Image (cartoon, helix red, strand yellow):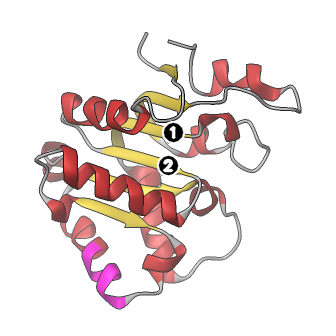
Amino acid sequence: SRSGIIVLPCGAGKTLTGITAACTIKKSTLVVCTSQVSAEQWKREFLKWSVLNPNDILIFSSKTTKNVADLKRLQFLYDYTAEELKKKSIILICTYTMLSYSHQRAESAQKMMDFIEGHDWGLMLLDEVQVVPAQNFSRISDIVKAHCKLGLTATLVREDGKIDDLHFLVGPKL
């Protein structure tokens, strides 16, 4: 299967599994997680377990869009041509909320969203994938063009009965 969901217990290595998948395909990866804290954890773990250039591991969040230094780190993405970006493996980490926000954005945040929507992602990692069927998050699968989607979770459960939607939004349980 090209896409799917991995269910592992807490502490069993879901993050490391995602990092291994991203490093194995050697294509740009979009990591989507539930919070700023989680995004920072993903970045630390990529730095710890991969040999990727630290400048190629970026966080896009409400916090980074307000910080001038962070905005400058994101700016380099716009300087590459589409062909140059295809040859470069970047890791962009963001939250479900940042991707699904549908109101007016600051110019810098909108520019990044345009990049995310227009980029050809090799892999989209969906941390805590059980949140994806939520009405405000399910559109992320339509916004992002990814060759492969990998959902990660320890709890493949939802009280609203929408867990089966994951099969169509992400893929089967692997």
Q: Main secondary structure of the magenta part?
A: helix
Q: Mark yes or no: residue 23 visible.
A: yes
- Which amino acid type is marked by label 1? Leu
Q: Is residue 136 left or right of residue 95?
A: right
Identify the residue position indicated by label 2 in the image. 32
Using the image as rendered, state which of residue 56 and residue 78 is in the foreground: 56
Q: Is residue 33 left or right of residue 83?
A: right
Tag 2's secondary structure? Answer: strand
Tag 1's secondary structure? Answer: strand
Q: Which residues are magenta?
A: 68-73
| Label 1 close to label 2 by CB (< 8 Å) | yes
Q: CA distance from mark 1 to mark 2?
A: 5 Å
Q: Outermost residue toward the bottom?
A: 68
**x, y (%) of residue 118?**
41, 51
Q: Residues within 10 Å of mark 1 (few under 14, many from 20)?
A: many
Identify the residue position indicated by label 1 in the image. 126
